[in-house]
Structure formats: structure tokens, C-alpha cells
Amino acid sequence: MKKILLPIDPSEYTKAAWKYVVEISKLQKAFVEGIAILDVLDIVEQAVTFFPLPQGTEGHIKKEEDLLVKARKKVEEELINFKEACKAENLRCQAKIMEGRPDFIIEKESLYNDLIVMGIRNFFHFETRNRPETSLKDILGYINTPVLAVPKTYKPIRKVLMTYDASAPSMKAIQRFVTMTKGMEYEIILLTKSDDEKAAMAEMEKLEDYLAHHGNRPVTKRWISHSLRKTVGKDYLDTVDMIICGKYSKSPVKEFFTGKFTNYLIDQNRVPVFIGQ
């Protein structure tokens, strides 16, 4: 993992994401690409609401220019802060402003990065909206790059929950995570949902053996036959520092990989989620 993408906005979520970027990039000696996004079309549309066209053309143009100037100034300040923070942490980095829809830009930039670290909530439209957006949900189904989505509070990674069902996506997520955190010490909880306890435990034993080759970390195995979301919500959201899950598919058959579980974690906004792609 040699290149990390950090979408930047003026929020506590980005501040928390930055702390994870520092930790991971130092472990991996990775380059960090910070991008601030200006959604010019959104600003134009917002200006129209103040001065409807065509009667309010002059006022609309003035409002649009004012919003763009303020937005550009703010993102430039954020990128200056980002570069200064990188320098203070001795991280190699690049900072740039990009124009367009945030989800489209992040999707495109993901092609040239090994990891995306971003807030579970994001505020790319800070000049036109007071509420967070759903950019994270928008991009998850369209990218193949792993995403570390974080709430607005940073916690050191000491205990992680790995959701596992012996499928390729869940295994790929775990492989990418343990590679990313090589050299880091933490406790692992393996959680699997299955109707067959014996088969599930056998698969988790194989996974435990695999994990042993990537570090001497304590592993606890747990099998359940009931609701994954209810179990995670009741037992783990407030007790672990990160949850690892595979990218969901559009199949309604497996709860691990429908949008329900991933979206549940995003909606809860309580613990960082590493979504392996």
C-alpha cells in the first residue's frame, strides 16, 4: 500500500480521517494525496435559488461569484493546512483542488490509489448546505479500492472485529487490512453468521491460521446463527475500534454483502469501518 487518497472538507470527520492517514502512511511509508473538491454546478444551482433566472440574472451572477470565491478560499486554506500537517509528520504528499461532483471525482481518483480514507459523513458542499452528504454511499458500489470510513472521533486501533463468511470478498477485505496494518498490534475478533456451526468454525480456524502468519495477535472466534446487524449493534459497536467487512454485492441472498449491513454501519456512525473492495 503505497498511495493513500484523503478527500478533504472543513469538518471534524476529515480531522479524524487525517489521524488514521498519519498512522497508516507511517506504517506503509505511503504517499498521501489530499484532494479538495469544488462542486461548481451545485454552487450555480444554489445561486439560482436566491435570484431566479432570467429576471435575476445580474444578482444570480454576483451570488454565484461570491459563493465560488468563498468556497475556493476555504478549500485553499484547508489544503495549506494539509500540506503543513504533512510536513510536520514528515509525510510525502500532494494537494490539489478538483472541480466536479464529489462522488465522480473520488471514484475516478480511486483508480490511482491503494486506499481511500474519508469521513463516514462528509461536507463537500459546505458553502451551500449545512447538512452532511451521502457521498460515501454513492461511491461504494462503483469502486474497487478499499475504503476506511471514519466517524468524527479518532481511536487508536487496539481491537478489531472481522466479519467473515468464507467468501472471496470477506477474505479479500481481511487480507488487505492485515497487509495495511503490518507491524501494528491489536486484538482480533472473528465473527461469522451461518446455519452450520461446525462448518463455520472450521472455516474460522483456517482464517486464524492465515492471520497467524501476519502477526502474533490474539484471536477470538464467534459463530452466530441470528441477525448480524443486531449482534454487531448490541455487542461490538461500542467495544471495538474498527470493523472489517467485505464489499457487498447486489445479491439479496447473503446479508453480509447486501447494502443492508454496510449501510447499517454507515448510518450508525459510531465506529470506523474498513470496507475491502
Image (cartoon, grey):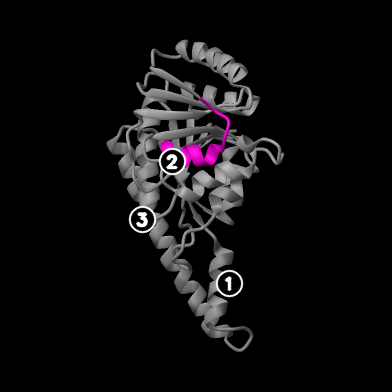
Residue beneath disc 3 = 77
- As displayed, is residue 58 above or below residue 74? below
Give me the residue at 54% from left, 18% from top.
Answer: 204
User: How busy is the neighbourhood of tag 1: few (under 14 within 10 Å), some, or many (20 plus)?
Assistant: some
Side (left or right) of 253 relative to 25: right
Mark found first going from the N terminus, 3 or 1: 1
Q: Which residue is mark 1?
A: 45
Q: Earlier in the sequence, mark 1 or mark 2?
A: 1
Q: Quadrant of residue 142?
A: top right
Specify few, some or many for label 3: CA neighbours under 10 Å numbering under 14, 14-19, or 20 or more. few
Query: Decide: marks 3, 2 in contact (CB < 8 A)?
Result: no
Which residue range is magenta in the image?
223-235
**Kind of residue at disc 3:** Glu
On-image quarter of the C terminus? top right
Task: Judge by depth and name the residue closer to the eye, 88 or 226.
Answer: 226
Q: Which residue is mark 2?
A: 234
Q: Position of residue 31 (x, y in %)?
A: 44, 32
In space, the residues marked 3 and 1 are separated at their CA atoms by 24 Å
In-image side of 22 versus 179 (left or right): left
Give whichever of discs 3 and 2 has the lower sequence position.
Answer: 3
Give yes or no for residue 176 being in the magenta stretch. no
- Report crowding for label 2: few under 14, some 14 to 19, many 20 or more residues within 10 A (C-alpha): few
Q: Which circle, 3 or 2, is nearer the viewer?
A: 2
Determine if the magenta segment contains residue 225.
yes
Magenta part mainly helix, strand or loop? helix
Q: Position of residue 145 (x, y in %)?
A: 58, 35
Residue 265 or residue 153, whichever sits in front: 265
Q: Of the residues shown, which amino acid type is indicated by label 1?
A: Glu
Q: Which of 68/242 is in front?
A: 242
Q: Amino acid at mark 2?
A: Lys
The residues bearing labels 3 and 2 have C-alpha atoms spaced at a distance of 41 Å
Q: Is residue 44 left or right of residue 118?
A: right
